[in-house]
Structure formats: C-alpha cells, structure tokens
Image: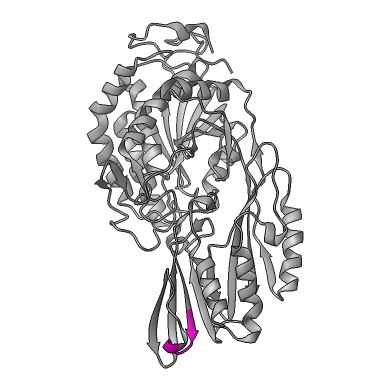
Amino acid sequence: MSDNSSNSANSTKSVSKFSREEINEFIEKNWDAYMEDLRSLVAIDSVEDMKTAGPGAPFGKGPKEALDKSLEIAAKLGFETKDEEGYVGLCDYAPKEAAGTPADNGVPVDSETTIAIMGHVDIVPVGQGWDTNPFEVVEQKGYLFGRGVIDDKGPFLASLYAGKFFIERGINLPYLLRYIVGSNEETEMGDATYYAEHHPQPTFLLTPDGDFPVSAGEKGIFALQFVAKGMAGKKLEKIEAGTASNVIPKISVAYVKADMEDLPPHQDIEIEDLGDGRAKITATGIPGHAAFPEKALSPSRLLFDYLHANHLYDEDQKDFIHLGRRIQESAYGEPLGIDASDDVFEPLTVVGGLLYQDGDDLVQDVNIRFPKSTSPQKIQEQLQKIADKYHMELVPGEPADVYYIGADSDPVQALHACFTEFSGEEVPIGTMAGGTYARDFDRGVAFGPSTPWKRFPSFVGDEHSTNEGVPIERLKFVMGIYIAAIQRLMDLTY
C-alpha cells in the first residue's frame, strides 16, 4: 500500500480514501438506475443453448443477449466497450495521462498494468419449484429474488456501478480498469479461454462470484458419469433429476411399473397413479449448489431409498439402485473410498444431483470438489473399481485442477484489509469449493458476494437453487466495497 493511503477522506479526487458517507450517497443516488438495469438483465434467459449458437453468439442466443445488454449498460455508465465475437465483452476505463506521470493518488501512470474484474451474465437452468417468476426481480421482506440476482448478474452489475463512481468524478487512475463480461462461466468457461488466447494476462483479477473476505484458492472440480447400459425401460422405467452437474435439484423423479396399493405413503415422497400399472414417484429435497452440499438435501437420496425399500426395480437393475444409494450416503466420499482433506481446503465433496435416461441407458452423474491432497487420477482409479463392481461404465469429464494463489501477496492482503475495514468483521482469508474465473488466470481471486458464515432464511435460495435470492443490503454493501477495493488495488505498485 502506498503512503498516499492517508489522504483526506473528504477528497473527491483521491483514489486512496473515500468516506463511507460519500460512497453511501453514491449508492443511494444510483440505486434506482441499478435496479432498472438488474431487472433488464434478469429478464434474459441466458442459459447456454448450443442449438442457437452461431457466429457472434458462440454460446447461444440467451448468453449473447445478456452480453449485449451488459455492454449497453456499461456504455451508458461511461465505459469504453467492445464485443469480442460474442465470447466476452470489454468495458474499459483507461488512465487519462501519459505513462510515468502521477495519477490522482500519486502512483505513476502505467497503462500496461491492468486491474480486471470479470463476472458472468450466463445462468444455470432455473429448475422447478419457484415461488416467483425466476426471470423477474421480485422484492419480498428485504430480499430480491430471481435467477442471477446473486450468481452473478447482481454482484457483477454492482461492481460495474462501482467503476462508475470513478468515471463520474473524472478520477485519473494509474492503471487500466477493465471489466470482462463473461457469458459461459456456468458450463465450460470458454469465455475465459477466449480472453486468455487473445489478450495478455491481467496484472491482477478479481471476480465478484465467490466468498468474502477473499478466496485465495479453489478446489479442483471433476464430473464423471456412471452409465448402466441397457437398464432403462424395465420395472424402473426411467429416472430424472437435475438440469446440470453443478446443481443439487429440488426434486427427483422415477417412473416405475407398479400398482398403487404396492406403494406406501412416505414423507417427502409424492406418488401419482399413471394408470395401466404405472406410477410416477417424486421426491422433494432442498436445492443448492453442488459445491455446498451441507446446505442442501438431495432428493435423489430420498428417491433411491424409497425405490430400494419397496423393491421398485428388476433384479438386473439392482446394481444401479445400490450404487445410487452408495453415492447418496455421504457428501464427503467415504462410501466410495475417495474422501480426502488437507491443511488448506475443506474436505472433498461429492454430489450425485444429475440423473437421466440416455436411450436405453440410465446415467448417474457425480460432481466432485477435491482438495490438493488428492488428484483426478486417484479419484478416477478408485471410481473405476466401483464402476466395475456394479457392472457399469465410467465416463470421466475433463477435470479442473486445484487453484491456489496463497494469502501473502499484496493484492490479496489489500482486499482482505478492505473487507475487514469496510465490514467491521474479522474473518480469515479462505478458500472455496466453487469454481470461478480466478482459476483461469495467473493472478486472480474471488472477492464476494457471499458470506458462508451467515445463512439466509429458509425461504431464500442460494446460488444455483430454487428461489435464488439476495438481501438488498448485501448488494448495496458489495457495490460499496468494490469501490473501496478498486481504490486499494489502484494504490499498489505492481
């Protein structure tokens, strides 16, 4: 941190310090405009849709529409904007003086140094069971509801407005402030790959798509599928749960050949008579993000237990049922022999939230978040033994390795100090289980908006879940803290 951090809190031209009153005044002045922009973004169904993909829209119509809307908003706020073939959008606020001259905080201008903020405007599928329209921002009891209000349209838009704070004051920053609008974070992160292939690495990057106080590392991510070949269409006709690997769904459904009198009632299980000796069995759980299974209740666990207890499968489908129960038995991998922990990350987690029929096959997906004490190779080797035991095929996806930047670098320390000062809370630098853009860059961290040590009321859903919601005050808080964070990062010498 430069010596200029002691500049007057009342200065409107100093990057180093702004009073909370000045920041709060800015937030209240811009809140109605922010909400109007948030509504316009949430109204866009920006789930990846490769059926509508094409030149200029590599991830489909919805993500491209959300990208266009974001660039429109950014241009209105005063940024120089550019659409890069529909992969990412760039929103820049560049230094106004020549290199080497002092910026408003005394740090020499260096336009080659880039402080980047990358968020995403694509979303996961909305799923089932919402109490409100997921594509409409609804305010209730001090919360906003809608798909993307916390992951990640709401926080990214708040960070963009934080940039406006500097633009409208005409502050000469020492470094390029660049916002990167992503549109493929929830699936393959092809947007981050595109950026890395076409631009130099940012000097430092933060993403408003993780946890406070600051996440200095992220678990590895590995999705695999167990495939029961030729097992569909029997007594257990088919089974369905989830819309994406990284989502714990609210419901799981099985279609079985059975008479109603053979299906006893059960809490959290709904049974529908389809006629002709067929029934639909629906289990209801608590939805959530696959990275945080402790916050959710898998409906598939309830469903597999019910199917097993009432023998609703043919003998040759037994392995599929038994493996499903084994996967659902624990979120930490012990029944599968893949449990792991270390001194930096929380223990490995495994979620089997996605179930589906693929032709004549039944498929069970597992989404694994692993610490540095294990590896995709070890996990795959062990799961192959499990697959062999249950006479199933194992299909591994492409793993994302563990990412760890560490806690000692100046930018990480600056962000941590920023959170401590701005929030008044003493929370240590941490790591997280979710995957963010940070792992795709040389020097990146996730910085908010979530606070894992605080829980929402039961009627408010987390990221990726039904009834996704966020406190209004949280979004105001993140807009303010991103102003302070930009200021602190601009004070550093890189």
Question: Could you tell me which residue is drawn at 35 percent across and 53 percent down?
Answer: 467
Q: Is residue 193 visible?
A: yes
The quadrant of the image that shows the N terminus is top right
Foreground pick, 327 / 197: 327
Residue 321 vs 406, above or below: the answer is: below
Q: Quadrant of residue 62?
A: bottom left
Residue at image location 44% in from the left, 49% down from the top = 463
Give residue 485's position: percent from left, percent from top: 45, 24
Q: Is residue 200 magenta?
A: no
Residue 460 percent coordinates (x, y): 36, 49
| On-image quarter of the C terminus | top right
Q: Please, is residue 318 above or below residue 202 in the view?
A: below
Residue span colored magenta = 255-261
Name the residue furthest bottom.
276
Residue 80 can be seen in this image:
no
Q: Position of residue 334 (x, y in %)?
A: 68, 57
Give the vertical position of 269 relative to 151 (above or below).
Answer: below
Snapshot colouring:
one colour
Which residue is found at the position 43% from the left and 84% from the top? 279
Left/right placement of residue 281 relative to residue 222 reads left
